[in-house]
Every structure is written in structure tokens, then in C-alpha cells.
Image (spheres, rainbow, N blue to C red):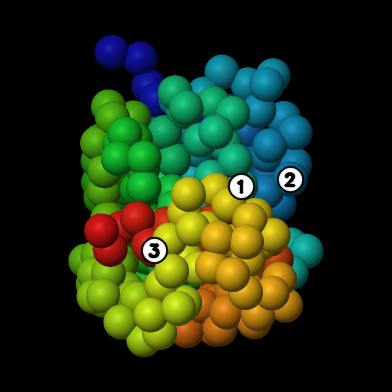
Amino acid sequence: MSALRVAVADDSVLLREGLVRVLRDAGLEVVAAFGDAEALLTALPALELDAVVLDVRMPPTFRDEGVRAAIELRRRHPGIAILLLSQYVEVAYAQELLAAGTGGVGYLLKDRVVSLDEVRDALNRVAAGGTVLDPEVITQLMARRVDPLQSLTAREREVLELMAQGRTNGAIASTLFIGVGAVEKHISAIFTKLALDAAEGDHRRVLAVLAWLQAQ
């Protein structure tokens, strides 16, 4: 059986090179390593890969570039398995990455990885189509799933339901017989109550709809 072909993306030179060495020691073929998510996405078409190992927070903002790149990678190359290996849990994006339910995804916390065998086994499992999640990731995902909509008012729920149907703000306003400005205020309140950061921009609308669908 041939070794898994893996690429690594981590902004820290020491951690990246250490991870490359660890993976090679675990019997994997590391074909490329990158210091940021954009470089990884750019190089992907030229690489033959089974899996990618990504840190969650990378340049330029050190917020969520890795996990957002993982979502884009899954969209462009669904056959490549993804293992997020990070110190942080980005719950909203982890939910989106897992939402398709197709497997081939893992999320481990660096501080809790205790052996080479654990990394190798996780990569083998996700490459085979499985899902590998650190218990802390599961705990935070489940906490997020505990009725995230309970704080919304009846009107905000109506607005969110129409958002889930793909309605524009103008269409929502017409359906509910309210002004577009009122719709925008309701949507802003929804984002705040669902703890969707303003830095996520238009992507917040997708995450809000995902929260609605998961609560049904």
C-alpha cells in the first residue's frame, strides 16, 4: 500500500517543518508545505494529494484563514481529505465544514495530540472518508447546537426563515409588510444573537441560515 500523499500549511516555520518531519516519520509522503492558506489553494491543481493538514489561524489576519481555506478546498477538490490541526476551535466554520456530512474531515487540537500514531491514524481515517474530531471540538460543537435560536424574537425567526428560503432583504420586507430598513435591523440582531462576527462579512448570512437549518 502506497503512503498517503499529504500537503501541510502552517505559518510558523518551526511548527511547519516540525510537522513535516513528524508526518514523514509516521510513514507519510509530504509532497509540499506552505506558510499560508492562499499559497496552498494556488498550488493545489498541480499537486496529487490524498490529504491536506492545515492550521486554523494563518496570515494575513491570523483569524480563520485555514479553516476557510479548508471549506474552499472541499468545494474545489471534494476528493481531498482535510485535517485541521490547531490550537483553536473555530466552531462556526467547523460546523460549515462538517455540514455536508460526507466525511473525509478531521479536527484535532495540537496540545492534545500525544503521538505520531495519532496523527497518522487520523489522516488514514479521513483519507478513507471518515471523520475524526477531538473531544473538545465535539463539546464546543454540541454547545453551539443547543437551540442557538432560542434568543431570537418571533419576528427575527420569521426573517431568518425567509433568509433560509433564499429571499433577498427586499423580498423579506414585502412578505412581512415591513420596510427594508426594519429587515436590516432584524438581520443585524440575528447576527449579534448568533455570535456571528462582523468580520465574517456577507458570509454571516450563510452561517445564520445553517444555524436555522440545524435547529429544524
Q: Residue sitting at 65 percent across and 80 percent down?
A: 182
Three-letter residue code for mark 3: Ala
Local crowd at mark 3 within 10 Å, few (<14), some, or many (≥20)?
many
Three-letter residue code for mark 1: Ala
Instruction: Mark 2 and mark 1 in contact? Answer it, CB < 8 Å.
Output: yes
- Sequence order check: which comes first, mark 3 or mark 1? 1
Q: Residue sitting at 47 percent across and 54 percent down?
A: 164
Residue beneath label 2, please? 38
Q: Secondary structure at mark 2?
A: helix
Q: Secondary structure at mark 3?
A: helix
Residue 60: percent from left, percent from top? 78, 64
User: In which quadrant of the rendered view does residue 100 lie?
Assistant: top left
User: In which quadrant of the rendered view does residue 111 lie?
Assistant: bottom left
Outermost residue toward the top in this view: 1
- Sequence order check: which comes first, mark 3 or mark 2? 2
Name the residue nearer the viewer: 23 or 86. Answer: 86
From the viewer's perspective, is residue 55 above or below residue 34?
Answer: below
Three-letter residue code for mark 2: Glu
Residue 211, numbered label: 3
Residue 12, numbered label: none
Name the residue nearer the viewer: 159 or 94. Answer: 159
Residue 173: percent from left, percent from top? 63, 66
From the viewer's perspective, is residue 82 above or below residue 159?
Answer: above
Q: Secondary structure at mark 1?
A: helix
Residue beneath label 1, please? 69
Residue 159: percent from left, percent from top? 50, 68
Q: Give the CA distance from mark 3 to mark 1.
A: 21 Å
Residue 196 visible, this orientation: yes
